[in-house]
Image: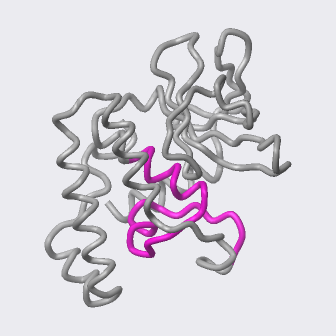
Amino acid sequence: MLLSSSYPSFSKKELHNIKKTSGSIAKNRAEDYQNNIRSYKTIGKEKQLLKVNFYLNQLLSQYDSVIQKREDYWATPKEFLLAGYGDCEDYVIIKYFTLLKLGFDENKLYFTTVYEKYTGGYHMVLSYFQTKDKSPLILDNLSFRILSLKAREDLKADVFINSNGMFKIGKKNKLYKTHTSNNKFKSLIYRIKKED
């Protein structure tokens, strides 16, 4: 396992400090996250996916250049919750760690860069491979619906990333490794371990 299965979580002391440094709204957001995710533990995996996607998509979207004053910053789940807004990769990161917290297999979850065919830009989504050789389900901050990659005709998958490395998708939805690690992913894990 990458990290403790409880991440992200906030102790009473941490919540008290958040209220002092970031205000009551940030503290309430962190508490609300903990309470909601705890309530999802008793429901089935498909419902957990829907609930997590819906709940976290309600956080506001904002470009890194506005929030972090720099491009392409990968915020930790705690940074995202305290700020209350982020961009596409921040949604992917918090969904990834929230699903791990709910007991999902990290070998089935991937940060996925995709090319948006209609807008002509790149975007990031979270892919969940329920079973081998089946098109992964896509959790997207731009959609409350969870559809398979095959059904998302607007997206063309580029790179799949998790703790095992970087991958491309081939025939029959089989992933093949292109790199053993990703620097941004490694840096994110390092920062998360310092928080945990």
Position of the N terminus by quadrant: top left
**Farthest right residue in view:** 120
Residue 182, relative to residue 150: is it above or below?
A: below
**Viewer-side residue, 74 vs 115:** 115
Q: What residue is rendered at 64% in x and 34% in y?
A: 160
Overall secondary structure of the magenta section: helix
Q: How is the image coloured?
A: one colour
- Residue shown at 60% from the left, 56% from the top: 88
Task: From the top left corner, tell me how far across and down residue 59 is, in percent.
Answer: 45, 64
Q: Residue at x 50, y 35 (%)?
A: 146
Front-lying residue, 11 or 121: 121
Which residue is at 71% across, 36% downward? 159
Q: Is residue 155 above or below residue 185?
A: above
- Which x, y percent locates residue 113? 69, 42
Instruction: State left or right for residue 17 relative to residue 168.
Output: left
Up the image or down, 180 lies above or below 9; here it is: above
Looking at the figure, which quarter contains the C terminus?
A: bottom left
Q: Number of labelled discs?
A: 0
| Residue 48: quarter of image | top left
Q: Which range is magenta?
A: 70-97
Residue 121, position as x, y percentages in the image: 81, 51
Name the foreground residue: 100 vs 46.
Answer: 46
Q: Quadrant of residue 101?
A: top left
Residue 75 falls inside the magenta stretch: yes
Question: Where 166 falls versus 8 (above or below)?
Answer: above
On whether residue 184 falls in the magenta region, the answer is: no
Q: Position of residue 104 (x, y in %)?
A: 35, 31
Q: Quadrant of residue 82?
A: bottom left
